[in-house]
């Protein structure tokens, strides 16, 4: 058990490409930290730096009060679960799990107990003698987890461990991973590009973009108060509607109170409702319904804002607005609707989207 | 399961197979059957007449003490060449697989020796280590080492082994490198995190995963060392001094081409053929079982 602290960590590749541009993160003992971001944002690189598989150009990584910059992966007391599981194909499930313990000269009797314990927790008891190629994707994933937990490391590192599984299994394994981490109470760092996975797993959510941290915090807090337009559109599905403030000034009650430097207004699809009267200080948008998506429990309405020029375009444009409606009730395509949202649900950002402003 | 094509007529499949069958028949079965037939004949010194002598050629062959010497020489030569060329190639390939500067230039250079014809390779080594002319033989003498492959059988053996290994390392290197690159990086990284040092990673992860390549190369190298090293031996030592580097395949050539004993030579090639077929069969039967696919 350990804290993991990253202090101004940077990674510059020999070609001069700066993959990680100075990152500070503090993960408390037993916490589950999720790094999320689009592909190429540096999240996997950062995790591999914590693991010791990539060198650290500058800054410090501290695991359990020990600076590990110059320490080999084997001696960092971490365990990693890889995206492709990275099981040893020529070893049985038992030997896959025992390998790390044998390398550390743990007595065979204890290896047996630990592997069997892990196999019981992960329901792999009947498969210990099989080779990885004889297992299904979900079972391989569990062997990879087992290999990590038998070592009893200070920190678990997960590199997109669920992205090779089908949707249903992914949800089941997501819950299993969270339960397992709670039960073992081991610090974990988890990389994913799936914002839903990030939201559901994290104690601490780190949203990354272009080698930098966009926002760190509690997932709900990030959801409710995104610090930048990048975070606003990345966290939450469907994404937050962002529109230039100039285009909607006429529809916004109390527009005069909006700070002068404000450039973009954001409203989450679920914060809209269909009504004729706009609540005091809120916003009312007149929309023409372009498309409807029925998901079962809810319905997404894609509308074009009236009065803007590119109404006939098929491509989603800046004037498109997504509205979430509960249930299956939905207006007809082409119908005119008014979507309203109260002032407390509006998000205001600077012109470049880098800063959140009060409203 | 892969889909298999079903032909309606009988003719088309045979036509499609014909080129491959023709090559196998003309270049393998026909010469092989000729050799077997020849091994039962005795020709006169001028090649004008031949008579059927049954197993006499074989009886004469196994009565020759030189033949047993050649078998012994072949065992020593082939095990040295196979083990060394595989070992050295594996060492080079593991080094080339690392992310080093100039790795691609190194890989290209490594492949060149394979493009050199065996006889030319032999001539190169002959001159480099010639007792009086050789560029490397002189320093050896200066250091007080009495290097003379022309007179000393052990030195001659060392020389042909080096030449044969040098020639084959390039080929083995190429396959080992491809094999190494096919091993997923993350498996090796998992090994590193699991606390295995580089050597332990090599022997417990990389080497077992490389075993299909190693097995394939073992078969190819044994065939190489039994048949194709003859050009090198001819150019470097011509089987000498005093027959110390005469392997079985070189003796086939020496007795048949130089000695004019076509029947005896044919009998030797039949024996050689049987040995190689047996060795390959043994490898497939026993070694392949231990291979991880």
Image (cartoon, helix red, strand yellow):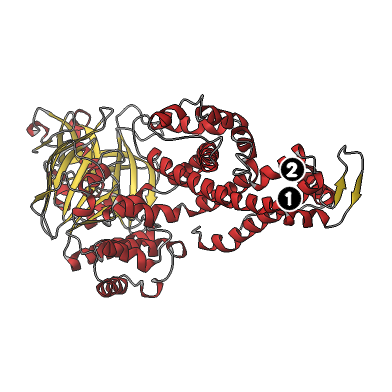
Count neighbours of disc 1 (C-alpha within 10 A) and say few if under 14, some if 14 to 19, many if 20 or more.
many
Please state if B53 lies on the left or on the right of A265 as rendered. right
Count neighbours of disc 2 (C-alpha within 10 A) and say few if under 14, some if 14 to 19, many if 20 or more.
some
Chain identity of mark 2:
B
- Which of B73/A39 is in front? B73
Q: Is residue A276 visible?
A: no
Chain identity of mark 1:
B
Q: Are marks 2 and 1 on the same chain?
A: yes
Quadrant in which residue A250 is drawn: top left
Q: Residue at x 50, y 33 (%)?
A: B111
Name which of mark 2 and mark 1 comes first in the sequence. Answer: 2
Residue B15 coordinates in the image, percent (x, y)? 81, 45
Residue A149 coordinates in the image, percent (x, y)? 25, 64
Q: Residue at x 32, y 72 (%)?
A: A119
- In contact (CB < 8 Å): disc 2 and disc 1: yes
Q: Mark 1 sits on what residue?
A: B268
- Which of B14/A124 is in front? B14
């Amino acid at each position: 058990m350990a804290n993991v602290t990253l202090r101004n960590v940077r990674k510059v590749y020999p070609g001069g490409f700066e993959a990680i541009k100075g990152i500070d993160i503090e993960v408390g003992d037993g916490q589950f930290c999720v790094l999320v971001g689009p592909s190429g944002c540096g999240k996997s690189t950062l995790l591999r730096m914590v693991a010791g598989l990539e060198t650290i150009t500058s800054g410090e990584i501290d695991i359990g009060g020990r600076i590990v910059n110059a320490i080999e992966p084997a001696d960092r007391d971490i365990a990693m679960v890889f995206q492709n599981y990275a099981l040893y194909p020529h070893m049985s499930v038992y030997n896959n799990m025992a390998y790390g313990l044998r390398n550390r000269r743990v007595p065979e009797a204890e290896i047996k107990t630990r592997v069997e314990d892990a196999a019981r927790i992960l329901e792999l008891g009947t498969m210990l003698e099989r080779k990885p190629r004889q297992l299904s994707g979900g079972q391989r994933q569990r062997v990879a987890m087992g290999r990590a937990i038998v070592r009893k490391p200070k920190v678990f590192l997960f590199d997109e461990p669920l992205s090779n599984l089908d949707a249903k299994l992914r949800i089941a394994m997501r819950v299993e991973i969270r339960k397992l981490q709670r039960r073992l109470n081991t610090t974990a760092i988890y990389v994913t590009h799936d914002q839903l996975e990030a939201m559901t797993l994290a104690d601490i959510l780190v949203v990354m973009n272009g080698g930098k941290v966009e926002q760190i915090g509690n997932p709900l807090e990030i959801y409710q108060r995104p610090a930048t337009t990048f975070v606003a559109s990345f966290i939450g599905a469907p994404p937050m509607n962002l529109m230039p403030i100039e285009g909607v000034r006429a529809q916004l009650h109390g527009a005069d109170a909006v700070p002068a430097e404000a450039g973009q207004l954001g409203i989450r699809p679920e914060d809209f409702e269909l009504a004729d009267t706009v609540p005091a200080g809120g916003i009312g948008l007149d929309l023409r319904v372009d498309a409807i998506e029925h998901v079962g429990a809810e319905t997404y309405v894609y509308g074009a804002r009236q009065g803007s020029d590119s109404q006939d375009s098929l491509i989603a444009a800046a004037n498109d607005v997504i509205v979430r409606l509960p249930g299956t009730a939905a207006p007809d395509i082409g119908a005119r609707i008014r979507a309203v949202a109260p002032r407390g649900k509006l998000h205001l950002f600077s012109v470049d989207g880098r800063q959140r402003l009060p409203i | 399961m892969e889909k298999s094509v079903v032909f309606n007529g009988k003719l088309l499949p045979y036509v499609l197979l014909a080129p491959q069958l023709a090559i196998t028949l003309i270049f393998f079965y026909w010469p092989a059957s000729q050799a077997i037939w020849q091994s039962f004949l005795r020709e006169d010194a001028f090649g004008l007449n031949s008579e059927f002598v049954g197993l006499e050629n074989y009886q004469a062959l196994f009565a020759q003490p030189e033949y047993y010497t050649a078998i012994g020489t072949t065992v020593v030569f082939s095990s040295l060449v196979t083990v060394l060329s595989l070992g050295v190639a594996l060492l080079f390939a593991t080094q080339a697989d690392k992310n080093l500067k100039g790795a691609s230039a190194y890989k290209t250079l490594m492949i060149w020796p394979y493009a050199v014809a065996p006889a030319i390779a032999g001539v190169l080594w002959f001159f480099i280590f010639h007792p009086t002319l050789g560029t490397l033989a002189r320093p050896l003498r200066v250091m007080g080492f009495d290097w003379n492959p022309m007179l000393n059988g052990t030195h001659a053996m060392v020389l042909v082994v080096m030449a044969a290994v040098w020639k084959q390392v390039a080929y083995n290197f190429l396959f080992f490198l491809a094999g190494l690159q096919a091993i997923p990086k993350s498996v090796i990284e998992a090994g590193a995190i699991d606390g295995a040092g580089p050597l332990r990673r090599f022997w417990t992860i990389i080497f077992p995963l490389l075993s299909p390549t190693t097995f394939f190369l073992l078969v190819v190298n044994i065939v190489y060392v039994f048949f194709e090293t003859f050009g090198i031996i001819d150019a470097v030592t011509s089987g000498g001094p005093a027959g110390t580097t005469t392997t079985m395949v070189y003796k086939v050539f020496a007795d048949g081409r130089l000695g004019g004993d076509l029947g005896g030579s044919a009998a030797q090639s039949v024996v050689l053929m049987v040995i190689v077929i047996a060795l390959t069969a043994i490898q497939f039967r026993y070694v392949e079982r231990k291979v991880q696919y």
